[in-house]
Amino acid sequence: MTAGGRHPATGDNGAVPVRPRRPTGQRSKGPVDPRFGERLRRLRLQRGLTQEQLAGDDFTKAFISHVEVGRTRVSLRAAGILAARLGTDVGELVSVRDEAALHTELELVVAERYLAQGDLAAAAGRARAVLTSDTFSRARARRIEGLALSRGGRAREGIGPLIESVQLFRGAGDEGAAVRASYDLAYAHASLDEVGAAIGLSVACEHALVTGAVVDGTLELQVRSLLSVLYTRIGDVGSADLQAERAIALAEDVVDEGALDQLYTALMSTRKEQGDLEGALTWARKALALHEKGGREAEAVHAWNNLAWVYIERNQPDRAEHALARAERLRSEKHPHQSSHLAVTRAKLELARGNADAARTLTETLAADSTLLPTSRAQAMFIRARAMAAAERAPVGPIRKAFAEAIAAYAREPARKRAQVREAYAEFLARRGQPAEAYREAREALRLHRPGH
């Protein structure tokens, strides 16, 4: 198979012909102009060449793709070969004659460095300040700004710049960069629990990768990992598993730790939602190990929180307390948007320990929190209803209302989760001597567990 997933042409005997490759130094042997990839792409498009045609016998299509998007650099010898193939002088590729363009490039490089270092405010501010008439450079600036906002817990604000970056990349004739920005946009929508928009964008990215319009193993791993989580979110277990299997296969050839982080987190989420708690625990630990190795504090907070959630489901409250306490200690003023998420887990743990009053107090505070995502709000309302139901002599009316609110909050959740709420409500009604209503809720839970029956 080629990098794009297509079978290469075969010879008369059915064997794949092996084309001789000459060593051309595909590894960088020193710094080159950071705008090399942009100029290479533009000249290629002007000449009407595909990436495969430009690669010829000397390079791979994947290598050309990586050079064009700035994922790797080339040796001067390789630059000379590419320049000759494009019918231009090597100096046209490796030098910048426009001082203003060089200044813009340096500003973008600084913004990208801030983004990589996690200084999200500086990255967004630096990118926002970039003023240029060059379409591709403006697209890069808007993408950096959108990513910085999204990673800083301000995904709603980041969506606008990301949409603009997709449009600008397409206007510049760079479909590969447009697809990468589309993935960033899909991730932003997913972080806002806007599953429909996230799936639509991710499927479009997947199509570009499968058809070979874009060749990027790391991006494909990221897209399939995200799709696995999104399909799990809507209850499509078969599609989620298929995407996860393909992602695991891709991971063998990917060394990008950020992409592997995402895969492990996706697999943890998928296994947890499917009730495979042992599998969820395995992948949660793998994700945590990578986050801590890379010093990614914000991601480590989420990983410890996920680990706590799995331990609660496994009825291991002491281990859950240890994991959650680690998450709470790691959280800092730089990550205030994670506070509510951790509070939901804390309420779930208090309820699991039998501290119903503490769980109810926490969830009532969360009910007034406007920053909670819909899925976290639904979880908080379900915990509140169960905490209220734990008090044997509490009035039935308010508890009925709490369960009704939880059921409404779970309207967009997968059928399995909606069934869990109905089951808990049925148990409460049965304990309180309401057999007819308990039977009705139990039947509804069974219907949700067995859709189509």
Image: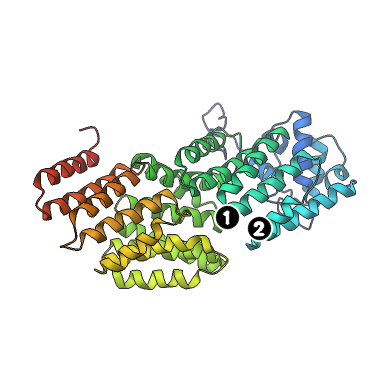
**Quick check: marks 1 and 2 in contact, CB under 8 Å?**
yes
Q: Name the residue that disc number 2 marks.
A: 115
Residue 340 location (% of width, % of height)? 44, 61
Horizontally, is 151 left or right of 112 in the view? left
Indicate which disc, 1 or 2, sits on the residue closer to the N terminus.
Answer: 2
Q: Residue at x 71, y 55 (%)?
A: 125
Q: Residue at x 90, y 46 (%)?
A: 97
Q: Residue at x 39, y 56 (%)?
A: 367
Disc number for residue 10: none
Residue 29 location (% of width, % of height)? 76, 57
Tag in front: 1 or 2: 1
Q: Name the residue that disc number 1 marks.
A: 151
Q: Looking at this view, is 249 or 300 the one in front?
A: 300
Tell me the quadrant of the picture where the C terminus can be found: top left
Disc 1 element: helix
Residue 402 location (% of width, % of height)? 27, 52
Q: Amino acid at mark 1?
A: Arg
Residue 384 location (% of width, % of height)? 30, 58
Q: Is residue 311 visible?
A: no
Q: Amino acid at mark 2?
A: Leu
Mark 2 Cα shell of 10 Å, populated few (<14), some (14-19), many (≥20)? many
Total number of numbered discs in the rendering: 2
Quadrant of residue 113 within the rendered picture: bottom right
Horizontally, is 218 left or right of 46 in the view? left
Quadrant of residue 211 within the rendered picture: top right
Alpha-carbon distance for marks 1 and 2?
Answer: 9 Å
Q: Looking at this view, is 205 or 119 the one in front?
A: 119
Does residue 148 sit above or below 213 in this rendering?
Answer: below
Scheme by which the image is coloured: rainbow
